[in-house]
């Protein structure tokens, strides 16, 4: 057992920390409910691995393996949400599958479009919760999609709007995957409406939306396996990034179970002293900066991807010259990359965005100290879609797409 707290497996494989002794800012919250139970029609086939689906189809229909391959292709390549759409299956076979299971997807409630082309998809789960994902046009070709792993969030990072929603539950693997499919379908529909020959693709995937992905490790791992399958979305692992606020046991598992060699990792750091990080990110009261950085440094090397440290710049809190100097020291020799993110304001937040001059000074000091750094330009902040703003809010000037 980790010395920092009592961990146990619950709610679909997530890790839950007993924080009953903590006061004021709680490091990790418990979900209000577990993963949804299968409904009256049985399990959702979208979340099954190819082997699990093959066993289920064999049990339900009998016959050759290719029947399961057909179903898998309909779900993960063609993104259908009904058995009736599986036209190369017989009517009786579709009816039998429909009696034993479901393939329903997430419902798209609203799509909001930003002035910069970013779109926020508000999606509804089968048990009535709402989540959000963000579709961001790349500077070159294709799109980056930022997806969620929880309804709300288990953590309490004070700069993030999502934490104000509390923690309802983890998302199941199929709910994580289907965010990608709903966005792909949106792009395909747009292309068809414009008589375009080709629909643009989602080329990059970041698990940086609502929730702490590594706190929902089992379902996130399963979703990544499905999304990287060439028979479905076929997104290359090197183009997927998983974000974490610093759950040390889960980061260790990320390395131990091979994910560190498959996908990228972004660590939300956001402070250079424990005193500040304890307040900004209460998870630091369980695993401090020294422990977090040591754990990240011990991960197996990914030859294709450097570790990224996310650093949200908060006016007068973590953006001083002294902070820049400490950050250089903390990351010395790591070869890591820093994403500097000027704070994106939202209602009720206790912080402000630093001036452009302060951001520039901080970044230049890092560069002079040998740290590779990129300033992340806010995207979609007018519709509440920028980093740290996802809280089911329409933003200041949103228009339905």
Image (cartoon, rainbow, N blue to C red):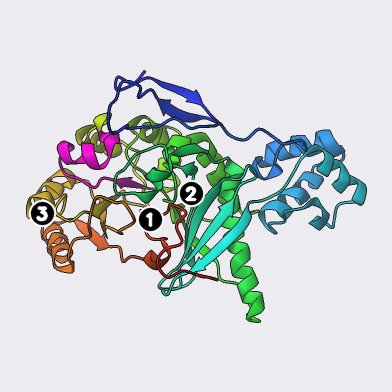
Callouts 3 and 2 close, C-beta under 8 Å: no
Q: Quadrant of residue 36?
A: top right
Q: Position of residue 207 (x, y in %)?
A: 45, 50
Figure quadrant of the C terminus: bottom right
Q: Residue at left 24%, top 38%?
A: 293
Q: What number is the disc on residue 281?
A: none
Say what secondary structure mark 2 lies in: loop
Tell me if 115 is positioned left or right of 333 in this view.
right
Crowding at label 2, few (<14), some or many (≥20) Cα neighbours within 10 Å?
A: many
Specify which label sits upstream in the sequence, 3 or 2.
2
Q: Position of residue 324 (x, y in %)?
A: 12, 53
Q: Position of residue 226 (x, y in %)?
A: 59, 47
| Highlighted range, magenta | 266-284
Q: Residue at left 17%, top 65%?
A: 355
Q: CA distance from mark 2 to mark 1?
A: 13 Å
Q: What number is the disc on residue 320?
A: 3
Specify which label sits upstream in the sequence, 1 or 3.
3
Q: CA distance from mark 3 to mark 2?
A: 32 Å
Say what secondary structure mark 3 lies in: loop
Residue at image mark 1: 389
Specify which label sits upstream in the sequence, 2 or 1.
2
Q: Position of residue 85 (x, y in %)?
A: 80, 57
Q: Residue at left 17%, top 56%?
A: 315
Residue at image mark 2: 148
Confirm whether the magenta stretch covers residue 277: yes
Say what secondary structure mark 1 lies in: loop
Q: Residue furthest left?
A: 322
């Amino acid at each position: 057992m980790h010395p920092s707290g009592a961990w146990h497996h619950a709610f679909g494989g997530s890790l839950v920390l007993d924080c009953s002794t903590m006061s004021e800012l709680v490091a990790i919250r418990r979900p209000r409910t577990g993963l949804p139970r299968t409904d009256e029609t049985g399990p959702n086939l979208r979340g099954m691995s190819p082997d699990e689906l093959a066993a289920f189809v064999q049990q339900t229909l009998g016959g050759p393996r290719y029947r399961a391959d057909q179903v898998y292709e309909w779900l993960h390549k063609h993104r259908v949400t009904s058995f009736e759409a599986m036209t190369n299956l017989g009517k009786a076979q579709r009816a039998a599958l429909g009696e034993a299971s479901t393939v329903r997807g997430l419902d798209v409630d609203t799509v909001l479009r930003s002035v910069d082309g970013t779109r926020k998809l508000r999606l509804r789960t089968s048990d009535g919760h709402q989540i959000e994902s963000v579709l961001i046009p790349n500077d070159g070709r294709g799109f980056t999609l930022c997806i969620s792993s929880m309804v709300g969030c288990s953590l309490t990072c004070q700069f993030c709007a999502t934490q104000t929603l509390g923690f309802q539950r983890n998302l199941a693997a199929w709910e994580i995957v289907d965010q990608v499919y709903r966005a792909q379908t949106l792009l395909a529909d747009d292309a068809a409406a414009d008589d375009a020959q080709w629909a643009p693709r989602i080329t990059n995937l970041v698990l940086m939306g609502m929730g702490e992905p590594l706190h929902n490790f089992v379902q996130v791992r399963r979703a990544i396996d499905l999304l990287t399958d060439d028979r479905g979305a076929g997104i290359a692992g090197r183009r997927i990034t998983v974000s974490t606020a610093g759950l040390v046991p889960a980061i260790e598992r990320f390395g131990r179970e091979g994910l560190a060699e498959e996908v990228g990792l972004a660590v939300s750091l956001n402070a250079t002293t424990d005193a500040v990080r304890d307040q900004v990110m209460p998870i630091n009261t369980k695993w401090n900066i020294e422990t977090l950085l040591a754990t990240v440094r011990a991960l197996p090397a990914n030859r294709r991807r450097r570790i990224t440290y996310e650093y949200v710049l908060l006016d007068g809190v973590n953006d001083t010259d002294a902070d820049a100097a400490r950050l250089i020291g903390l990351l010395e020799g790591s070869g890591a990359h820093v994403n500097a993110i000027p704070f994106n304001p939202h209602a009720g937040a206790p912080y402000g965005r630093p001036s452009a001059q302060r951001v520039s000074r901080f970044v230049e000091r890092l560069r002079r100290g040998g740290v590779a750094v990129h300033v992340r330009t806010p995207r979609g902040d007018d519709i509440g879609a920028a980093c740290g703003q996802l809280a089911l809010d329409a933003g200041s000037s949103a228009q339905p797409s």
